[in-house]
Amino acid sequence: MATAKKAPAKKAAAKKAAPAKKAAAKKPVAKKAAPAKKAAAKKPAAKKAAPAKKAAPAKKAAAKKPAAKKAPAKKRTPNAAFMKAMTPSAALAAVIGNAAAPRTEVVSKLWTYIKKHGLQDKVNKRNINADDKLKAVFGKSQVTMFELAGLIGKHLS
């Protein structure tokens, strides 16, 4: 690998030498030695960077070995508390209906209502602008989507 890095340096030196040859006809011989010194100064810097790059992949490979020995992940089963059918309050029932539903379906129905009525804020999509029905559920005119589940929980029993 070290030879591969030296080859581009030689090419770069050769490219610098070509303009230097043109300049050599016009300038004295003392100027030719300066590009050679610059190229020599750059070569040790490239060698110092190479060991650091080799060390990083070795750490990554060591980190991957223990992960490969783990058993395949089991399929997740939903928590029973999320799947329990809950009855919505009168305010929430005006939005999603009177039927008892699990929390996951309540959130899904609420998002369907929000998208159907275009209540998602146009500038910041994380915000929901409440209409009259949703103000009764949320208690304020605008909420973030992260507050949504907490506010709905108060209306389920």
Image (cartoon, rainbow, N blue to C red):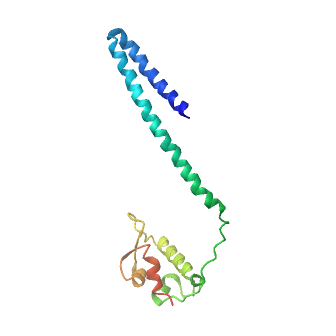
- Residue toward you, 94 or 123: 123
Q: Which of the 4 image quadrants contains residue 100?
A: bottom right
Percent from the top left, x then y, of residue 14? 46, 20
For image coordinates 47% across by 27% down, the residue present is 9
- Residue toward you, 52 or 147: 52
Percent from the top left, x then y, of residue 28? 32, 10
- Residue toward you, 112 or 155: 155
Percent from the top left, x then y, of residue 136? 40, 84
Whether 75 is drawn above or below 60: the answer is below
For image coordinates 56% across by 49% down, the residue present is 58
For image coordinates 48% across by 24% down, the residue present is 10
Which residue is outermost to the top?
25
Task: Specify whether 86 is left or right of 31.
Answer: right
For image coordinates 39% across by 81% down, the residue present is 135
Whether 36 is drawn above or below 115: the answer is above
Whether 26 is drawn above or below 86: the answer is above
Mark count: 0
Q: Which of the 4 image quadrants contains residue 146?
A: bottom left
Q: Which of the 4 image quadrants contains residue 84?
A: bottom right
Whether 92 is drawn above or below 10: the answer is below
Percent from the top left, x then y, of residue 117? 46, 72
Q: Considering the image in quadrants, where does the N terminus appear?
A: top right
